[in-house]
Amino acid sequence: MRLKIKDINIDKEQVKKFLGYASKPCPPIILKKIDEEMERAAELFEPEVLVKRFKIDSIKGAETRFGGTTSIQSEYVAQELEDSIELYLALYTIGNRIEKRINEHSIGSEMIRAMILDKIGVVALDDINRQLKEAIEEESAPYKISAQIFPSQRDFEISNQKMIFEALEAEISNITISSHFQFNPIKTVAVIFGMGSAADKLSMCDRCENKCF
């Protein structure tokens, strides 16, 4: 299923935090550049969001089987999905246009603007994630999102990005994956959402092992 994304909301405070200003004042010149880049960013976003729903067939040991023929070998995934009834595979991106502008800033010796726009892109992906979760919780009601799992977490290898990509490939327009399991556009995210009766109380940042702030 292709999901239509509404206007992407950029949280300025989150941009500042990702730039290292979570607990210290942001210089006026940086604030000015953040405002300028945020104002221009909307024209750079080319969102593509794909999602597919599956029933979980079984979880035994480190193996999670779903959709009749697909399985994941990961103790972490099995543990995270143990209270889930079904799952969604999702893939979303903000496109290549923003990376081209980041490169233009870098080549033009505007490294601060390049960094700011990069963080705006990260915050944009977070907002897509929020809208995606709202949409699938509405479709899957009364189930709630009980798990959110990203390839490269714990023993859930990055190679599983290919599994998610292939499950959604028939509807993909502008996303490709390399032999090293890296996506193009760069700002593309693959994720599994587990759906169960109890909502997951941890955010993406809570689960992240590499804290930004």
Image (tube, helix red, strand yellow):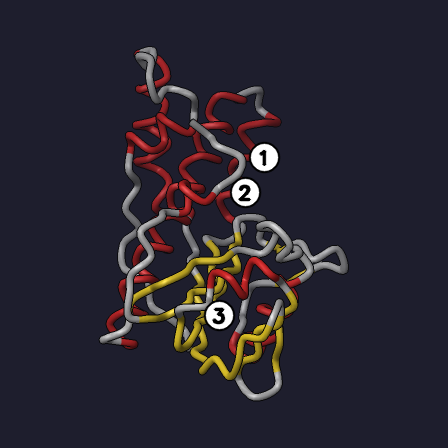
Farthest residue in the bottom direction? Answer: 68
Is mark 2 in CB contact (under 8 Å) with mark 1?
Answer: yes
Query: Does 11 sit above or below residue 165?
Result: above
Q: Which dot marks residue 209?
A: none
Q: Residues within 10 Å of mark 3 (few under 14, many from 20)?
A: many
Task: Give residue 208's position: percent from left, percent from top.
Answer: 48, 41
Is residue 56 rendered to the left or right of residue 139?
A: right
Residue 166: quarter of image: bottom right
Task: Give residue 31's position: percent from left, percent from top.
Answer: 31, 19
- Observer-nearest residue: 180 or 194? 194
The residue sitting at 58% across, 35% down in the picture is 103
- Observer-nearest residue: 84 or 113? 84
Report the number of discs: 3
Is residue 166 rendered to the left or right of residue 7?
A: right
Quote the CA–CA distance across marks 1 and 3.
31 Å
Identify the residue under disc 1: 103
Task: Give residue 141's position: percent from left, percent from top.
Answer: 24, 75
Q: Secondary structure at mark 2?
A: helix
Q: Secondary structure at mark 3?
A: strand
The residue under label 2 is which amino acid type? Glu
Task: Give residue 165's position: percent from left, percent from top.
Answer: 59, 68
Identify the residue under disc 2: 99
The residue under label 1 is which amino acid type? Asn
Residue 168: quarter of image: bottom right
